[in-house]
């Protein structure tokens, strides 16, 4: 297995490994023999101590099997994230276990058993830590079982995998919960038993034979209450890190442990204490681990690392390895993920003052529904992004809002009750059908002092028809408005959660709002108005993809429809299918900007593609969209 091909877990997908210079073995010592231990400790005398971690007769094929990082990791190279180091204090020593004591997973050492699943263990352990850190102590143990058995693109399960692919899988597909072997914790606990490295112990002896990869299951243990789909948790964006130690340290300081891969040599299984560096033996393979901190011992800088060979290996399951010289490639292979998820957005963004009032309106509206009523939440308009706390200036994105308003009207005609969540300045149902007041209205005659306002004769029939429709459906229509991005996000979360709780599959989410791709976080906003005499610096953050929690948590029982607007027709269907695969919802309404009134493509989670053509732009294409959606929603409700 080549030295330069192992993928690091958390950050760097640089492929070049640092050189590990080894001292040739004297004689033909078995790698696990007492002679080898004595040779390292008494002849080479490195900065670390060798000792007995494995029975001397353990087959080396077993240890090689534990090194489960496959060659070819360059196929999964991730974009590199660079931290700004100016003003960042990096301490001489750092231990995540003491920094975040409310996260017990940081102190855990798990056992991968006779399975080459180190790539999955290091990934899910780091994910678990980072989730807890980002959510201020909230615990969710990501399942190594689920990742090993279900991620086909990650490699070969128990026969090895690619760490970076594991982090991408978390972002795109999601991972459920699951604890250690025989723990009954979470949706899918690990099913491969730990084994005993030593001569005696409570576990069965380790062998070189290991079991096969567990079968992928899309369901949870019967004793676990949430469904598989409800239990899926997603990352936001995976990335690699520079091999520069300061970049890796900055990542750990800000977000928690990272996954790393390195080349394992036959002296490493003997590690007991001290700061490891390769001194003897041949390369066994690539191994993935979790870096949790750093420090110095006797002037030698090191990384503090958690292994997955149970807690009787090494220093209670942990080890230290030289830092700053890319020892065995450990600094060249770091990958990670920004687990801000969407909850972190809400942690940082104050709720609107009228949130409770809005939720009360929604509850009353739903409460008036019959047991078989269907309700659709239609979001419409665009989201304004303030750039000051006392807002004068803001960033806005384009949307006419007509699609949401027209669709709401046709949903009402199909018998739905409609919650219409719209930008306060955008088009509302039925209003779009009446020209501006100056074209429709006129004053009465001068004889009555212009005391009356009336509809012009040539507009009367049209206006009356629209008003009759508006009055007819007004009991079934709830209008709710938002002004900016944060209000929209909060309202979407609480309304969709309420629909999921009270209606389940009878609710539909029709997400037609044009959501800004970027926003200015509250902490990055100046308090007062930006002035034009100084060139402003505005820090934009990526808006979290709300489809992730919307379709998998807030409204997981509802029928969820999203929209995809592109300018390149050659990628439209591909992007729509990718969105369905990533966010696990039901339908994408896809269209090209220049032809959105004439042609719409509906892409279903089943893979079916329906093209709707509307050559006469005087007619609403939304009628045809709603007609198909009603049919699909009926089928969805009937599906157990």
Image (spheres, grey):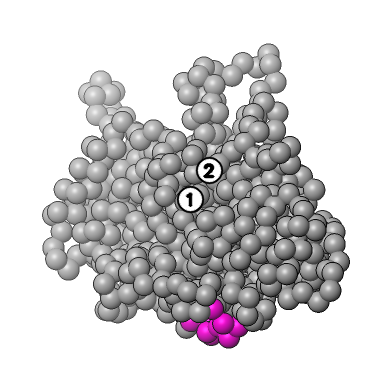
> Which residue occupies 66% across, 23% down?
536
Is 419 in the magenta? Answer: no
Is residue 274 placed above or below 589 in the rendered structure?
above
* Whole-number angstrom distance, CA of label 2 to CA of label 1: 7 Å
Q: Quadrant of the C terminus?
A: bottom left
Q: Give the secondary structure at mark 2.
A: helix
As drawn, is 62 to the left or to the right of 354? Answer: right
Q: Secondary structure at mark 1?
A: helix
Q: Which mark is residue 96?
A: 2
State the residue position of label 1.
106
Residue 301 drawn above or below residue 545: above
Which stretch did the figure color magenta? 206-214
Residue at image coords 59%, 71%? 54
Relative placement, left or right, of 263 versus 416 is: right
Residue 86 in picture, x, y percent from top left? 70, 28
Front residue of 577/343: it is 343
Q: Which of 183 and 277 lies nearest the eye of the viewer?
A: 277
What residue appears at the point 52 percent right and 34 percent down from the top-left corner? Answer: 521
């Amino acid at each position: 297995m080549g030295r330069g091909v192992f993928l690091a877990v958390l950050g760097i997908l640089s492929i070049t490994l640092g050189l590990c210079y080894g001292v040739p073995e004297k004689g033909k010592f078995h790698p696990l023999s007492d002679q080898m231990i004595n040779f390292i400790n008494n002849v080479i005398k490195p900065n670390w101590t060798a000792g007995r971690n494995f029975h001397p007769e353990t087959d080396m094929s077993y240890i090689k099997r534990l090194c489960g990082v496959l060659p070819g990791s360059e196929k999964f190279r991730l974009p590199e994230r660079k931290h700004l180091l100016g003003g960042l204090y990096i301490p001489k020593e750092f231990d995540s276990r003491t920094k975040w004591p409310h996260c017990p997973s940081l102190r855990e050492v798990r056992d991968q058993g006779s399975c080459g699943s180190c790539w999955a263990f290091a990934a899910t352990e780091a994910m678990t830590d980072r989730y807890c850190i980002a959510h201020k102590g909230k615990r969710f143990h990501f399942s190594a079982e689920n990742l090993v058995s279900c991620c086909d693109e990650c490699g070969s399960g128990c026969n090895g995998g690619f760490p970076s692919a594991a982090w991408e899988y978390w972002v795109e597909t999601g991972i459920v919960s699951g604890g250690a072997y025989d723990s009954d914790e979470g949706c899918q606990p690990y099913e491969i038993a730990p084994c005993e490295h030593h001569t005696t112990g409570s576990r069965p002896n380790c062998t070189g034979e290991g079991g096969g990869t567990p079968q992928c299951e899309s369901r949870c243990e019967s004793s676990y209450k949430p469904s598989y789909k409800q239990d899926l948790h997603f990352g936001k964006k995976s990335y690699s890190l520079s091999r520069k130690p300061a970049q890796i340290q900055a990542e750990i300081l800000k977000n928690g442990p990272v996954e790393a891969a390195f080349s394992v040599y036959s002296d490493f299984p003997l590690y007991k204490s001290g700061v490891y560096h390769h001194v003897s033996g041949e390369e066994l393979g690539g191994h993935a681990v979790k870096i949790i901190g750093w420090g110095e011992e006797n002037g030698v800088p090191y990384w503090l690392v958690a292994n997955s060979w149970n807690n009787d290996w090494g220093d209670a399951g942990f080890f230290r390895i030289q830092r700053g010289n890319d020892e065995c490639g450990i600094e060249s292979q770091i990958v990670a993920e920004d687990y801000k998820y969407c909850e972190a957005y809400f942690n940082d963004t104050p709720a609107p003052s009228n949130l409770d009032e809005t939720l009360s309106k929604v509850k009353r509206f739903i409460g008036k529904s019959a047991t078989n009523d269907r309700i659709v939440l239609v979001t419409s308009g665009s989201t304004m992004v303030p750039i000051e706390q006392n807002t004068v200036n803001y960033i806005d994105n384009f949307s006419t809002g007509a699609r949401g308003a027209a669709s709401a009207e046709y949903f009402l005609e199909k018998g739905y009750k409609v919650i219409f969540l719209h930008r306060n300045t955008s088009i509302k149902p039925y209003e779009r059908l009446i020209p501006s007041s100056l074209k429709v209205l006129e004053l009465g005659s001068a004889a009555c002092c212009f005391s009356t306002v009336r509809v012009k004769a040539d507009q009367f029939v049209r206006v009356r028809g629209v008003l009759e429709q508006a009055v007819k459906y007004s009991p079934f229509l709830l209008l709710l408005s938002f002004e900016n991005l944060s209000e929209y996000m909060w309202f979407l979360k609480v309304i969709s959660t309420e629909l999921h709780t009270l209606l389940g599959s009878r609710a539909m989410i029709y997400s037609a709002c044009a959501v800004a791709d970027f926003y200015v976080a509250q902490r990055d906003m100046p308090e007062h108005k930006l002035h034009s005499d100084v060139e402003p610096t505005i820090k934009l953050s990526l808006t979290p993809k709300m489809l992730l929690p919307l379709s998998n948590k807030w409204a997981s029982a509802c029928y969820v429809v999203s929209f995809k607007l592109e300018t390149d027709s050659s990628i439209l269907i591909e992007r729509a299918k990718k969105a369905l695969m990533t966010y696990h919802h039901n339908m994408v309404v896809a269209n090209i900007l220049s032809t959105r009134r004439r042609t719409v493509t509906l892409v279903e989670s089943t893979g079916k593609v329906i093209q709707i053509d509307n050559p006469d732009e005087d007619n609403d294409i939304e009628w045809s969209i709603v007609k198909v959606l009603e049919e699909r929603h009926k089928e969805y409700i009937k599906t157990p």
